[in-house]
Amino acid sequence: APRLLVQDPLAQHDALPLELEAFEDYLGRTQLERFRVALIDGDPVDFCCWAWAVARRCAGLVVLLDEADQVAPPGQEPRVFRQLVAQGRHRGIELVASARRPSEVSRYLTANATELYCFRSQEPKDLAYLRAILGSDATDALPELPRFEYVAWTVERWERRALTQLAVPRRESEKELTATAEKP
């Protein structure tokens, strides 16, 4: 995406990681033609406010909410978060969210989602939650998925898919462990 804002509390994404003061300074002084910038600390409400403000200044903004369950737990969604989710499309915002536990994700996100990608899940509460959204057939596939396979869901259909490449390169220590394990 040519214009990407990331709420990235674990600094895991390919974006310039900034703390709140530097994040605000960057967005306040940059032309916003092309950027990939992440807020790695600070209040998620501040992040949502900045995303809303940036969308007024540039078109085609992608907003990634990593650990979305921490940004806006169900029933505790800040007003600006609800506005970003429900009305962001009118400002050209493409919203992407990720979370480990689907039952802890705000219904504002899932109710407005056009696509959902769900990896293996066995937790009964999560499966019951997903069954109401995905339907029984797609949800029944989730506990049996092998590593790196997932269910891709849209309103029209669902299908099983597999990742062909990991997005995050392995750390050096993992490479060394693999090399050691492969020696006879």
Image (tube, grey):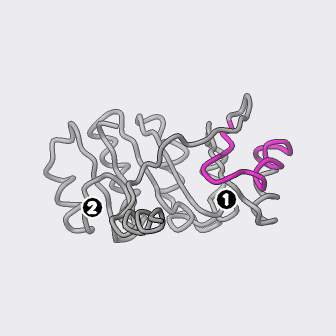
Q: Residue at x 37, y 67 (%)?
A: 176
Q: Is residue 148 magenta?
A: yes
Image coordinates for residue 126, horizontal then vertical, percent: 75, 61
Residue 17's disc is 2
State the image quarter where residue 19 is shown: bottom left
Disc on the earlier residue, 1 or 2? 2
Nearer-the-camera pick, 132 or 93: 132
Q: Is residue 63 magenta?
A: no
Q: Amino acid at mark 2?
A: Pro
Where disc 2 sits, the SS reads strand
Image side of residue 66 versus residue 24, left or right: right
Image coordinates for residue 124, horizontal then vertical, percent: 81, 65
Q: Which residues are magenta?
A: 132-153
Q: Amino acid at mark 1?
A: Pro
Image coordinates for residue 68, horizontal then vertical, percent: 53, 60
Q: Residue at x 53, y 48 (%)?
A: 85
Image coordinates for residue 125, horizontal then vertical, percent: 79, 65
Q: Which residue is mark 1?
A: 102
Where disc 1 sits, the SS reads helix
Nearer-the-camera pick, 110 or 58: 110
In the picture shown, does residue 68 fall above or below 4? below
Image side of residue 4 versus residue 142, left or right: left
Q: Quadrant of the N terminus?
A: top left
